[in-house]
Amino acid sequence: MDWDKLRVFHAVAEAGSFTHAGENLNLSQSAVSRQISALEESVKVPLFHRHARGLILTEQGELLYRTAHDVFAKLSMAEARIRESKERPSGPLKVTTTVAFGSTWLTPRINEFLERYPEIELSLVLNDEELDLAMREADVAIRMQPPRQADLVQRQLMTLRYHVFASPEYIKQFGIPKKPEDLKDHRLIIYGADARPPVSNVNWMMAVAQQFKPDMRPILKLNNIYGIFRATESGLGISALPDYLLPADSNLVRILPELEGPSFDAYFVYPEELRHSKRIAVFRDFLIEEIQSPATNLVAGLFSCVSTEQYNL
């Protein structure tokens, strides 16, 4: 089977159209179409159903695609290991993590990493869905729960905990709860039923309030941690947020310091085949250095806890 045709077939199956595949391969739409027709002629079966809205793999096309995908994944792994034979870390490094962690904690630190290792071509994929590392959808993942896939190397990066936060604007308008039972008189932002938090009892703050007011209702439900963070920043209400969501320039303040929510671990995860990757090693070491830095709240556990006197309450 012709290797170039197989490469074009894989690109078309991924893109869903000749046009998009051609753009990815720097080929014309007609050139891609000719390659696919020639491949179908050589295997003597149609590989795609052609529709006005795009291309759909036939049963035989699905079989060939799965095989080709496995081959390309193994080739990508081999290329990565060959690159790692160089003394200086270089080449592509694809990192995936959650939208919230990537947006608020990881991305602001990337500039320093790339200044140290300019030869590394870093890509960040922020997605609350877990990518398949074994199939090389990413090289490294930072996850807020232990990996479910087998054959993955994992290292615990840090332990994180939920605390209660509000914005100065909210406190000035609605006051500050002085004790846990005061939460029943405040506007609470909580996680919706379709949220995917790293802990099962993520709405523990609402449970505290409902001990004193069983019919307590939230001001807002959100299915995304980053969305809750931004809603809290806007002054909409009080929320329970994990430590990492508080960047240095955030205006949020921790309230009710005696209330500590559930904890969870963050993990650095990558395929076994990349255990000796220099790119992964330097990225891992950089993260650990940042986590252990005195300027990082995650290790010190130091958040500004406001007092009632500060707001003349």
Image (tube, helix red, strand yellow):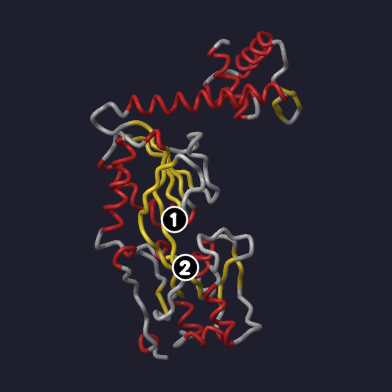
Front position in the image: 13 or 53: 13
| Spot occupied by residue 28 in the image (x, y as percentages of width and height) | 58, 18
Write the residue at 64% across / 64% down.
193
Between residue 106 and residue 180, name the one nearer to us: 180
Q: Is residue 178 left or right of residue 219?
A: left
Q: Where is residue 25 in the image (x, y as percent from the top left)?
A: 53, 22
Please state which amino acid type lies under the numbered disc 1: Phe
Question: Residue 57 at x, y = what percent?
Answer: 69, 26
Q: Which of 6 and 245 is in front in this view?
A: 6
Name the mark on residue 101.
Answer: 1
Report which quarter residue 5 is drawn in.
Answer: top right
> Around disc 2, counting alpha carbons within 10 Å, would you say few (fewer than 14), some (14 to 19), or many (20 or more)?
many
In which quadrant of the rendered image does the N terminus lie?
top right
Residue most toward the front? 150
Earlier along the polypeptide chain: callout 2 or callout 1? 1
Q: Which mark is residue 241?
A: 2
Q: In this picture, is 217 found above or below 264?
A: below
- Is 198 situated above or below 287? below
User: What is the three-letter code of the residue carrying label 2?
Assistant: Leu
Q: Is 117 situated left or right of 198 in this image?
A: left
Kind of element beneath mark 2: strand
Is 10 placed left or right of 312 in the picture? right
The quadrant in which residue 191 appears is bottom right
Q: What element carries label 1?
A: helix
